[in-house]
Amino acid sequence: MALFEEIYGSYFQAVRKILEKAAVTAITEKDMIQIVRACAFEESPSSIVPKLIRGPWSSLLRREKGDAKAWRSSLSHSSLKTPLTGLQKAWLKSLLEDRRFRLFFSREQLDCIAGELKETEPLFDLSDFYYFDRYEDGDDYESALYRQNFQTVLGALTKKKPLIAAYESGKGNSMTMEVLPCRLQYSFKNDKFRLLALEFRHGRTGRPVTLNLGRIRACHLSRRLPPKRFAPESAWNAGRDMPSVQIRIQNERNALERCMLHFAHYDKQTSYEPESDTWLCSIWYDSADETELLIELLSFGPVLRVLGPEKFWEQVQNRVLRQHELLYRPLEDGEERQQPE
Amino acid sequence: MSDFQELIKSFDRIRDYARQFFLYGFKVRGEFAEKSTRTYDNERRRIENYLAPYIHSSRAPKGRQVSIRMDTGRIRSNPLYAAWKSKSFTDRDLLLHFFLLDLMAGKEAMTVPALCDQIAARYGEVMDPQVIRLKCREYERLGLLCSQREGRTVAYRLTPPLSLESGSLCGQLLCAVKFCSEAAPFGVVGSTILDREYVSNDIFSWKHYFIVHTLEDEVLLTILAAMREKRFISFENHSSRSGRHTTVCGLPLKIFVSVQTGRRYLCLYFADRRRFGCLRLDCIFAPQPLEICPQYDQYQNKLARNLPHCWGVSFGGHSRMETLCMKLYIDESSEAHIIERLKREGRGGQVEKVRENVFLYTGSFFDANEMLPWVKSFTGRILDLQCSNKAVAAKVTADWEAMYQMYGGKDGYGSV
């Protein structure tokens, strides 16, 4: 089995879409260009469309009678969907063991999927992977309450309906709130789902809120209608503050590579400064994650220097000064430094 | 560049460039020393085509630098999957693909001569029966076609769809695929399933998502196949630090994944050294399966016994385990979350209360050196740190001293 096959390619996908559309209506060159732009790459229209119209692929199309600028498919069928390949089935089979995949289905449904794929060997086994630094307090995917809440939240997202949730905050405060779900966020590090939503009071949207699925005690769909033209993704992103922090990376201890890998999931921009043989890097982050970024930066020690902004720099400075003070303070009466075995 | 083609024959061709542009983004043409400038220009142009919305380009003193920039918290699906969908093909491959799908949609099995006749009659293309036969066999291997034999005649038909594809389960399955196409290994396969249905993820977003892993998936697939068959493997290891290329042989046992540092490793048993070791997947090229190891399960069990003593990917030197003790100040009334952090991030280390607002973390692992980044993330709270490996304690203390000079010196904010 190979991942890199032309049948999964963007060119095949673009031609398929053109042929399917041209099977039901005559299409123009402009239509084809639009389809290719949506399905394939920047310069693909100039490769695909001429080949279809007048080149080696032109037997797939025929000119529309009476319209020299329109084409129809030469094929008899309007659906050119391929059967699932062995690779795709093997991948689905592997997922059956994934607790997160199982959240989407009832036991009976999982049995049905397993039955359909019984002849298929899995592509991988989850036990082949060892996630050594994933946090140990991930969501309890086996809990009946969690599974029920997950299904309800998923329903609210797919149906674009407001959700009423009884929620327990991190500090143990209970509250009930109505929210407009925007996205269900999964954190690979925390192994947790969070619902990104907007507060929804008396039919009006409010500030962005993040609800940990593991802390929802009960939830159900609201009867209220969401606002007209509600676009979940842009609504959530509009409410996010994305400041940046500037750092200098020293050319020692492989710091550049470690840093670039570690912060690869952030939007960042790096440039080399030959005079100092260092790299300057700006990292953009969600302000809600500032503390997380701060401790990540601290974990690099002195090979990485925070340059600004000032408030961020001060937070680093406070921790570093405090650490110095803690280490070099005199021991209190009776206090001993811990000795390892 | 009149012969420029967007598509490529081999994925390895694009793998390294995509990685460099995404991770670093500041290198200019002259710094890609291993390849010619023309190769660089072609690969850069390809990547610019595949990932147009994410490409940033700027002028640097040494030339133009290209970077792939994105906040993975805002993407719906991994943009690097585009590179997997760029395999080149011949004109005949494409024509035959659609002819076969069209002719076989009638669900009746067809022989190669019948296909040959129909292709000529319906679409006006004359094709060599041998070419059609090879394509049918290829599609049978891929699972798109199945064959039936009657005497010496072989007839092909499309593989029937699964019944769950048309039933009530279909919507739920696609929803799960939207999630797993990003969150599960080999997510690009899920992405091809979504393409097949013309749908894309509109429900999930991601945090701590290292999209660059997908570039190693072809190598990973070969390694996992060798693991399934309990085989030794050999491969080229391209060291990212020294740049040296070496050939490595070993017994592949497990894939170690770091969800914090963006790295994946292959854990192997090296029979000649009688040791376990981990090598980064992104440095592995051209893996080849070798002979079967009769004691494979024995080494798997041995590794399983060792895993609780690994902080990360190091199995340590020849010394015994290293113990690290860290005493921290944590205000119990307002910082209970820090105590929770110690427990969930401590990888099995013990956390105990020493007295009011003072907690002790104790952990024993093969290589305490690997713990230092985590230890330093508690900077500002550590009352005392001791380690059985004195060099480790000395290193972290020296780091704090250097940081004190960096942030506590007279220069203050604004010094660079």
Image (cartoon, helix red, strand yellow):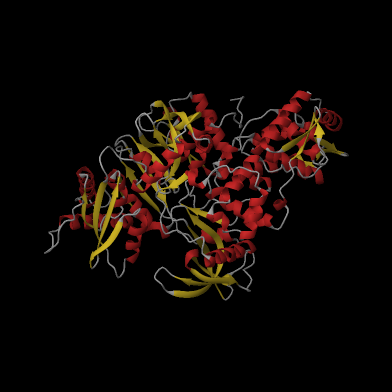
Location of residue B212 in the rendering, given as x and y in whole percent from the top left corner: 48, 42
Location of residue B126 in the rendering, given as x and y in whole percent from the top left corner: 81, 25
Looking at the image, the residue that sits furthest to the right is A66
Where residue B283 sits, quadrant-wise, is top left
In the rendered view, does A27 fall on the left or right side of B180?
A: right
Nearer to me, A308 or A171: A171
Check the image and report above or below for A47 versus B314.
above
In the rendered view, does B150 fall on the left or right side of B7?
A: right
Residue A212 visible from this viewpoint: no
Check the image and report above or below for B331 versus B81.
below
Nearer to me, A212 or B314: B314
Location of residue B175 in the rendering, given as x and y in whole percent from the top left corner: 62, 55
Residue B364 visible from this viewpoint: yes
The quarter of the image holding the N terminus of chain A is top right
Label count reads: 0
Location of residue A179 in the rendering, given as x and y in whole percent from the top left corner: 55, 69
Residue drawn at (50%, 45%), measured in percent from left and top?
A: B211
In the rendered view, does A100 fall on the left or right side of B327?
A: right
Where residue B276 sits, quadrant-wise, is top left
Residue drawn at (42%, 34%), measured in percent from left and top?
A: B27
